[in-house]
Amino acid sequence: MRTDHGHVHHETGKNQASGADKHAGHHTADFLRKFWVTLLLTLPILAYSDIFEIAAGVVLPRPFGIEIAILALGSTVFFYGGWVFLVGAFREIRARLPGMMTLIALAISAAYLFSIFQVLRGEMETLFWELSTLIAIMLLGHWIEMRSVQSAKGALNELAKLLPDTAEVLREGGSFVVPLSELKEGDMVLVKPGAKVPADGEIIEGRSDLNESIITGESKPVSKKTGDRVIAGAINGDGSLKLRVSHIGEKTFLAGVMRLVAEAEGSKSRLQLLSDKAAFWLTVIALVAGVTTFFAWILAAAGVVFATERLVAVLVIACPHALGLAVPLVAAISTTKAAQNGFLIKRRLALEAARSVNVVLFDKTGTLTKGEFGVTAASDEALALAAAVEAHSEHPIGKAIVVEARKRNLDIPDMRNFRAIPGSGVEADVAGSKVFVGHRGGEKIIVEKDGKEIGAIEVADTIRDEAKEAVSTLKEQGLSVVMITGDSHEVAEDVARALRIDEYFARVKPGEKSEKVKLLQSQGKKVAMVGDGVNDAPALTQADLGIAIGAGTNVAIESAGIILVRNDPRDIPKIIKLSKLTYTKMLQNLFWATGYNLVALPLAAGALAWKGVILEPAVAAIFMSLSTVIVALNAILLRRVQL
């Protein structure tokens, strides 16, 4: 991850940058260009092959020097088209991770060296057409693979393009357009209608609707006003905004998102680790099977040409090409899909763990509730008098009383002589009477006028509108929902009843939350903990799956495996669904990537040669490439699923 002129760029994870990266130093277009050149060079080689004579029934005239010409064409194909595989094999062997590039390199090297040997002997039986068609098909297969992976990561790479190139900075003497690299924290910038927000900041003046969909996954424009925070890359609506820049470069929300994406791409799931091991052992099996096949046919007096063809076919058909693509492609698509739906996968093991979760433990405040007080019950008279006393209060409960009074359009009288009574409440002179607002035991707020109680006001943490739907959906998915809070049993019971949550833990101190997670785990349950990622860190770490919600712009939360960009608990069921879909797709792809070997390997070795069934190296390459295409298409179908 780096910032360059204010832009955030994605860099591959350590795993991909290792010496074993089979596509290091190459672009997708390289493989397609090499394929077309190789195909053109292959046509004349194929025209003078025995397979063409048999298939077309035509024998072309063989001018003097045709063998040398075919040798030159075959050598060009080998070094020009096959060089990427030879270099890839060298990297795999140097990294002690022999895989598909090693097998391809061995196959084409065996075919090429044997053909050179035959030409030097003056023999006409060479493997140049098999070599050329094999390299052409392999190049096409790798182009398909790289195109698929590139397409899967396309939506994430678009994040790097969200920022504008310039910003309009407001300074003494007017406004100046400057490159983003010159922007500093504390600068005042103007964002005109339709323009992109250049940096994270706070609205100082103006009101508008901002489109944050590609960052947060929220499709509807978000209304923003003075005092609200905005995210770099968001698209401004019809209003004009004046912002104070708070974060630039690496500190921006967008940079944090890209950092998380890089971490996710650098991490591996258990299935991916399994597929890596399977690819390694398949390589070993292919080498052993190839050598065994070669010597078996030599001993059977089938001839060195036939034996070499079988060796090449076995090495090609056993290439773990599709196996190397099966899991990483699904992982890339699922990471993209998660970001498009408003949650970020920090570790792929976390997404994999989500499918086996059977209990979701919500921290109440800030997840199921807004963390803001609201009035749940009060008479108009008591509310109007209390609002008068609390008119200038900065206390959350005082603010909630004033907001509710205004919502009811009550006439709020003026007050004088405001006084705070330590440990009790506040009082003031309102319309010639002394009005007291405060606690006198219990959870209610008492309102007194001239020493006489005229009513009580009940306040509670406001339940999120989305919380009920989230709980209901999780139950439909077969999961249990549990709530944990530091509030009293009465408050916890009210929230649990409203949301139809069957079990809750009340009066739990922040440091005790992880103990409740352990308690549920001791009952044999797989727990997903949903918290704010700050005081819930121990519990998030202890849980089988830690999900940080309400993270705002602080996306670098170490204790959570998955981070929700929006404060929306409805995204939790989406995580569970994506996890199950991803796991299913990975299993399907592992089947398609390995299943065909059970049939194709014996055919490639010549098990049915006595019946006249021979699997030529080029046909083996087609089957191998076909399995790669099937795996890629199956993975891409995941993008069409609605969460």
Image (spheres, rainbow, N blue to C red):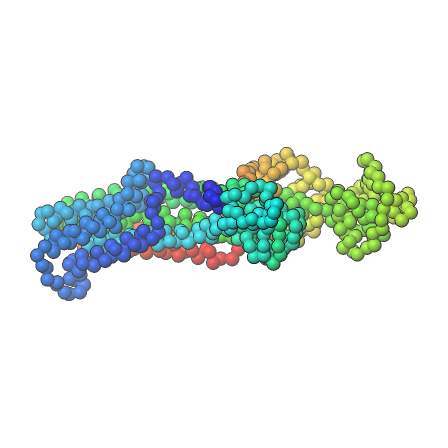
State the residue in front, 411 or 323. Answer: 411
Is 97 placed left or right of 578 in the picture?
Answer: left
Q: Which residue is drawn at 21% across and 56% down?
A: 41
State the residue in front, 309 or 68. Answer: 68
Q: In which quarter of the image is residue 363?
A: top right
Q: Position of residue 40 (x, y in %)?
A: 23, 58
Q: Which residue is drawn at 40% across and 51% down?
A: 149
| Name of the residue lying farthest toward the front | 173
State the residue in front, 278 or 416. Answer: 416
Q: Where is residue 483 in the image (x, y as percent from the top left)?
A: 65, 44
Residue 111 visible in the picture: yes
State the residue in front, 359 or 393. Answer: 393
Q: Residue at x 37, y 53 (%)?
A: 147
Considering only vertical position in the picture, is 94 above or below 131? above
Q: Position of residue 88 (x, y in %)?
A: 30, 43
Is 270 placed left or right of 58 in the picture?
Answer: right
Residue 588 visible in the picture: no
Considering only vertical position in the picture, is 87 above or below 195? above
| Name of the residue lying farthest toward the top | 511
| Name of the residue lying farthest toward the bottom | 57
